[in-house]
Image (cartoon, rainbow, N blue to C red):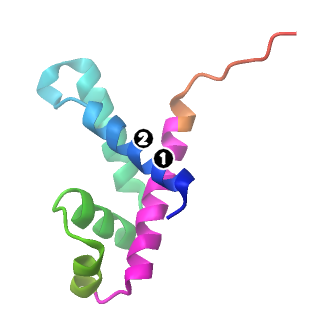
Amino acid sequence: MSARLKRLWRFTLRETAAAQPPSAGPRGSRELQRWQAVVNQLRADTRRVFTLRKVYELSVPDIAARLGLSAHDVEQHLVAAVLAFDRAAQADRPRVRPTA
């Protein structure tokens, strides 16, 4: 995995960890709903791989064996998930206009 994707992955994990459970109030609930929406928009295979890795904490080889995929395919699904989270995060950031 490239250095950029590793940074994105860490960012995704921090954002997910920062999302508080729905009982934590309206902001936590919105954050959780936002990230859940991203997960729900992933392709079924990508969502399955992401869930096995991040929720059930299975290793890449374990996921590959369980789903009958190669380790490379599992990594590609994880990259696709990271990029989806990155696109969602980019869309939520306010755009800064350069001053002239």
Magenta residues, dominant SS class: helix
Q: Residues within 10 Å of mark 1 (few under 14, many from 20)?
A: few
Q: Is residue 50 left or right of residue 73?
A: left
Q: Nearer the viewer, residue 89 or 11?
A: 11
- The percent position of residue 63, horizontal first and vertical second, equals 25, 77
Name the residue: 56% across, 51% down.
Answer: 4
Q: Which of the two residues, 52 or 4, is positioned nearer the viewer here?
A: 4
Residue 36: horizontal and vertical position, in percent? 31, 45
Say which residue label 1 marks: 7
Q: Which mark is residue 76?
A: none
Extreme-front residue of the structure: 3
Q: Going 43% across and 80% down the picture, which residue do you hit?
A: 73
What residue occupies the far top of the structure in this picture? 100
Q: Are marks 2 and 1 in contact (CB under 8 Å)?
A: yes
Magenta residues (range):
68-89
Residue identifier under label 2 = 11
- Write the residue at 48% across / 47% down: 8
Spatial CA span between label 2 and label 1: 6 Å
**Type of amino acid under label 2:** Phe
Percent of width and height locating residue 33: 30, 37
Amino acid type, label 1: Arg
